[in-house]
Amino acid sequence: MSMRNHLALFFLLSLFCSSSFAQQEQPLTRILFIFDASNSMNGVWENKPKIDVATRLLSTALDSLKDIENLELALRVYGHEKYYQKGQDCDDTKLLVPFGPNNAIRMKTELRKLKPKGTTPIAATLEKSANDFPKCPRSECRNIIILITDGIEECNGDPCAVSLALQKRNIILKPFVIGVGLNVEFREAFECVGTYFDATNQKKFKSALDIVISQALNNTTAQVNLLDFAGNPTETNVNMTFYDQRTGAILHNFVHTINNRGNPDTLALEPVHTYRVVAHTIPTREEDSIVITAGKHTIIGIPTPQGDLTLKMQGVNPENNDLSVIVREAGKMQTLNIQLFSETQKYIIGKYDLEILTMPRTYIEDVDISQSHTTTIEIPQPGIATFSKLGYGYGSVYVVKNNQLQLVATLDLMKERETLTLQPGEYVAVFRPKQARESIFTVEKRFKVTSGASAAVKFN
């Protein structure tokens, strides 16, 4: 092989290795199966004991998980140690198989040993499961609980509150609950615990188990369409925050991107969450109650029609202008944004009130922002007024509007000379020396400020 071919091969291998190392390490997925072995699992379900059906189908599912990389399993059981006839034991819950790789066979062995005996301490079981997940050995772990039960809480606990607390502490993702032959009215008791699947027969149980495991193992795809006024997905370059709607936890931040095919970029999302997505436009826009279905590409549409606002000052290069403007929605006092004259900013279409931080303030109401249009606001260049005083004293400057004086600035007591940058207009300056003991020594000066010019005001 020639030296040139050697170099080419080396280059290709280098690219491949760099690409491989650049890829993010896949998170470790840990699934804790919580299995109901309370006395009610002795009941008959389609001519067979519930415990036999549930353990057989779960064992089959475990077989399918034996050779999956980045996966660890564990098994916790409740209601299996103390007969309910001897009194209710609300501590009857135990981690039978701790987390580890390749332990599906051990879990199947433990499932075969189970004899339903006791009560249903779901809340206590969930609470103790927090310690079943060891410290994550990597930068990220996906901790998931799959609860299989045929009854509701019997120990006066609150499974919903415990589940929510575990999620808020980032110990687990939203759990999955499979109800084994439960009545429909029990659904409400579990929907607040996690994503609930109603297995009214064996076929539905197997289907629910397959769906739950698929959702637990796999991310799925979604795209966010930021819609313009016509409903087309043309808006982009906006940061989007994905929240867990139930816990309020921040899950992701993505800056919206249009890919090289002209379509919104595809995102990989966990199907275990119900999402609230906030597009950080000005003002923000959001969509909630977004459910991602495993294996199905989900399109999330958020109306974000935008236009641009730019500000100019006559005779001044915008890049050299550090003046700011407070932007509010029309008729509201809450500040939406503080925009510099040196920048152009996008806003959701509509009416806005501007408070430009000139001296005096410049107020412009009902500025219209329309789709894909740049609205330009231009104000006159200011002038400069220089105030010369007879020593230290008390002074103030007013602008004349509708034959009324409005305060613009209070002059510095300890300065004999100072300069103000003022917008064009008619002004009155008032001054009284500090040492004067009579009001008659008050000096009033009227003056005019024009764009780009200087005015000298002397109190003598």
Image (cartoon, rainbow, N blue to C red):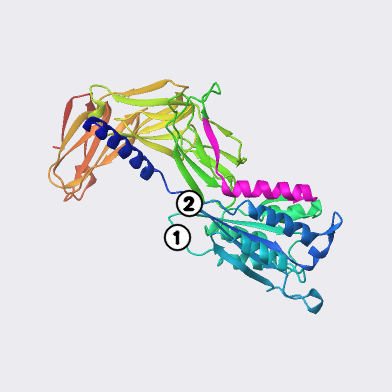
Mark before the other along the chain sequence, 1 or 2: 2
| Residue for badge 1 | 137
Q: Position of residue 198 (x, y in %)?
A: 75, 50
Residue at 73%, 59% in the rendered image: 55
Amino acid, disc 1: Pro
The Cα–Cα distance between marks 1 and 2, rounded to whole angstroms, is 10 Å
Residue at 67%, 58% in the rendered image: 147
Whether label 1 touches label 2, CB < 8 Å:
no
Q: Residues within 10 Å of mark 2 (few under 14, many from 20)?
A: some
Q: Quadrant of the C terminus?
A: top left
Of the pair 63 and 49, the residue shown nearer to us: 63
Position of 258 compared to 452: left or right? right
Position of 13 compared to 228: left or right? left
| Residue for badge 2 | 27
Residue extending farthest bottom: 86
Q: Position of residue 118 (x, y in %)?
A: 76, 71
Res 258 seen here: yes
